[in-house]
Amino acid sequence: MTPFRRIVRHGNLIDVRRMLGVGTFCYIAAHLALFFADQSYSPAKFFHEITHRVYLIIGAIAWLGLAALAATSTDGMVRRLGGLRWRRLHQAIYAIALLGLIHYFQQTKADVTVPTFAASLFLWLIGYRVLAWWQGTSELSPLSLLGLMIVVSLLTFAGEAIGIGIAFHVSPLRVLETVFDFDAGSGNERLMLCGNSFLTSLNKLAKAGMQVRTDEVVRLYGMQLQRWIIPQGTFYLRTHPLMNVMPGYTKCAFIIDPSALKYRYLQDTISQDQIQANDADEHKGQWLTECGLEVRHEKTLGFLSNFFA
């Protein structure tokens, strides 16, 4: 709150700092209560989970730290501890926030966009404090704020690449190479329509140690799709009935970049009315149009054949 108060030059914002701190503690307490409910309200199961899972241990330590700060946030506790000791105690919020970020990253299964954003905010706040201390001032100039923003953005970008590299056991440089591959369409997500034999072979590779994270079934493009996350990107898989009609296509798959396709109308749409049979007791009409899929980046699409494992 202090850096923001100084940037906007609004001293009254200091009055909401305590409310934000206590509100954060209450939010985390509710989070913990929901986890207790998820454990069927069993204290034994609750404490067993917290004491045997690393990310839960880290989260519990952060919550205990917040509890200590919330308990000493009253005016009476400030007078009892003294201003200097109270400030030193509440500087522990930086270590608590760091533990909270570690917990957040560890419990996030696939998409780390929100934890990365939270980490960048934390890094910016720490950077503001360090830069203000180094310059010997409480307020930073616009040029210093711009430089801080650029440095934090670069560090966040590099840190995300390193984290993805560690998670998938690949070089961070390979992650950066994928990000800056401007010929690869608009993203690293692909739709894969395959035959049953293709999907069976793919599942065998995953069980054999393939670097992949399988996520929950998601609904995209009007279909139920299984999300697979690999170092090269994200695939949304589904077996297609037409791939299983002919035996030669059951081991094949079409890889589609939806962003590289455009629905192109070739002629104007026309309306046809009164097309029901002469003896039919109904009224039937239809709309007709000639259209097709236009491929914008053909290198982002592919076809795999005779795939087996």
Image (cartoon, rainbow, N blue to C red):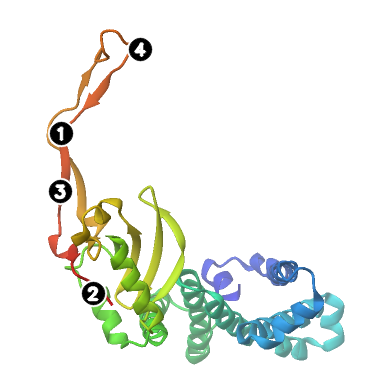
Earlier in the chain: of badge 2 and badge 3, it is 2
Task: Using the numbered discs, state the Cα–Cα distance from disc 2 to disc 3 in whole angstroms.
Answer: 25 Å
Dot 2, crowdedness within 10 Å: few (<14), some or many (≥20)? few
Task: Using the numbered discs, state the Cα–Cα distance from disc 2 to disc 1 in whole angstroms.
Answer: 37 Å
Q: Nearer the viewer, mark 2 or mark 3?
A: 3
Q: Position of residue 145 (x, y in %)?
A: 42, 76
Q: Quadrant of the N terminus?
A: bottom right
Query: Tag 4's secondary structure?
Result: loop
Look at the image and tell me whether residue 173 can be seen.
yes
Question: What amino acid is at disc 3?
Answer: Glu
Query: Tag 3's secondary structure?
Result: strand
Q: Which residue is mark 4?
A: 282
Dot 1, crowdedness within 10 Å: few (<14), some or many (≥20)? few
Earlier in the chain: of badge 4 and badge 3, it is 4
Dot 3, crowdedness within 10 Å: few (<14), some or many (≥20)? few
Query: Tag 1's secondary structure?
Result: loop
**In the displayed structure image, the side of residue 45 where residue 248 appears, left or right:** left
Earlier in the chain: of badge 2 and badge 4, it is 2
Q: Nearer the viewer, residue 63 or 228?
A: 228
Q: Which residue is mark 2?
A: 180
Q: Which residue is mark 3?
A: 294
Q: Quadrant of residue 55?
A: bottom right
Q: Nearer the viewer, mark 1 or mark 3?
A: 1
Q: Nearer the viewer, mark 2 or mark 1?
A: 1
Q: Nearer the viewer, mark 4 or mark 1?
A: 4
Question: What amino acid is at disc 1?
Answer: Glu
Task: Using the numbered discs, state the Cα–Cα distance from disc 2 to disc 4 in whole angstroms.
Answer: 58 Å
Tell whether label 3 touches label 4 (CB within 8 Å): no
